[in-house]
Image (tube, rainbow, N blue to C red):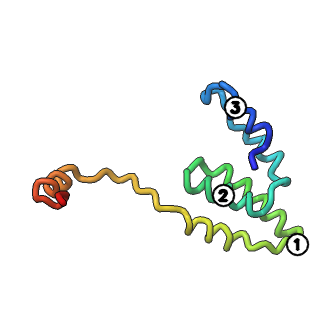
Amino acid sequence: MINKELEEFLDSDEDIENVKFDIEKVKENLPLFSNEKICEMIVCDRYLNFGPKISTICMEELAKRRLAGDTFNFEGHIKNLQSEMPVLDFTIPDIREILNQAISGKFQK
């Protein structure tokens, strides 16, 4: 469920350029998040390549929890979440190959 603050933001006319990512706010709220949520943040950070900072602070929080006796298998959970993500492929196809296939009739029904 979307929290009230996010819902109000989505309903507002505020420009997206004015939105700031506050790493200190993330650090402050991280202890409130579930293990699963923190794992999801790590996977999103790695998948979208935001940079190492989010993953690092999330892993530090999970390590603190482990030292405090939490037995949650976050390594396995992260691995499972990552395996569910589609592979991103940003390679540019060879336009000559596409044109040759089109000319040779491979795209015709």
Three-letter code, disc 1: Gly
**What x and y, as percent, mark residue 66?**
82, 69
The image shows residue 76, relative to residue 3, as above or below, that is below
Q: Nearer the viewer, mark 3 or mark 1?
A: 3
Taking the image as shown, residue 106 lies to the left or right of residue 93, namely left
Asked whether the residues under the numbered discs 3 and 2 touch, taking CB atoms below 8 Å apart as contact, a structural biologist would say: no
Give the residue at x 67% y 73%: 76
**What x and y, as percent, mark residue 12?**
69, 27
Q: For residue 82, which numbered disc appears in the image?
A: none
Kind of element beneath mark 3: helix
Distance CA(mark 1)–CA(mark 2): 21 Å
Kind of element beneath mark 2: helix
As rendered, which of 90 and 66 lies closer to the eye?
Answer: 90
Give the residue at x 46% y 61%: 87
The image shows residue 105, relative to residue 54, as above or below, that is below
Of labels 3 and 2, earlier in sequence is 3
Residue ID for mark 3:
11
**What x and y, as percent, mark residue 82?**
58, 65
Taking the image as shown, residue 93 lies to the left or right of residue 23, namely left
Q: For residue 69, which numbered disc appears in the image?
A: 1
Three-letter code, disc 2: Ile
Instruction: Check the picture and name the quadrant holding the C terminus.
Output: bottom left
Residue ID for mark 2:
42
